[in-house]
Amino acid sequence: MIYIKIESFELLQYQEKKDIINTLKKGGIIVFPTDSVYSIGCLLNNKKGIDRILKITGKPEKKSNLSLFFSNLKELANYTLNYNNTIFRSVKSLTPGPFTFIFRANKVVTKMFENSKKEVGVRIPDHPILIDILKELDEPIISTSLNTGDLEDNANNPFELSERYANEVDLVIDYGPSTQEVTTVLDCTGNDIELIRQGKGQLIA
């Protein structure tokens, strides 16, 4: 396992970024920081990686709540079904930030799941390291958070996560302790946005 320690005031060095991108493109799984809690993920087209993540986290596929991470909204339409301009403007006003938007998934996403997953979370995070990584990729990272079950006590401590998952993941990015606040979840599958869970993200009045 590769362990990358980054000070909170630093950005990724060339070799560090290369190691992360190569790990993902070779089918690896990484643990990485977000603007909420630490997450575990792989590239969307990595079906074996998705299966590994579900096994590691013990989350059944139907209840896995996996999310796609993008650096911006431009690629969103390539992975979701159509949504109206009201939804788009609302999402744009709230990003980047600690929000998870639930969209209806298109076939690019559903083909990766045995149960033809109908919906998928979408995130445009406000985190410099993660954005730097996403800009180098041709597809989104699919991920789930590491803040459930018996991990609640150490899910914000990347060093402890690296020790716990040393034999299960391929790379861990340590950007220091994270917040323990989860994202705010918004349902974008209808004509208007609906609040599902209030978390770190604050809605604009």
Image (spheres, rainbow, N blue to C red):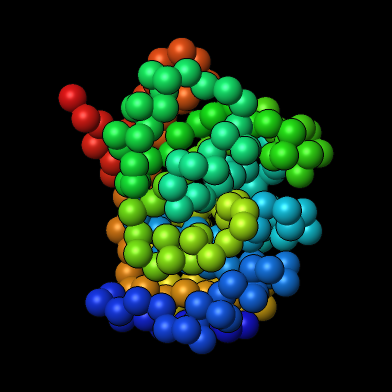
Residue shown at 35% from the left, 60% from the top: 127
Q: Is residue 130 left or right of residue 28?
A: left
Q: Furthest residue to the left?
A: 205
Q: Is residue 72 left or right of residue 81?
A: left
Residue shown at 37% from the left, 40% from the top: 99
- Indicate the position of residue 109 as horizontal and vertical percent values: 69, 39
Residue 132 lies, with reference to residue 91, above or below; the image says below
Q: Is residue 57 left or right of residue 95?
A: right
Say whether residue 205 is visible.
yes
Viewer-closest of 162 and 14: 14
Residue 129 sits in quarter: bottom left
Say whether residue 155 is visible.
no
Q: Is residue 173 left or right of residue 107?
A: left
How many labels were placed on the picture?
Answer: 0
Residue shown at 78% from the left, 33% from the top: 115
Residue shown at 78% from the left, 58% from the top: 48
Residue 86 lies, with reference to residue 106, above or below; the image says above
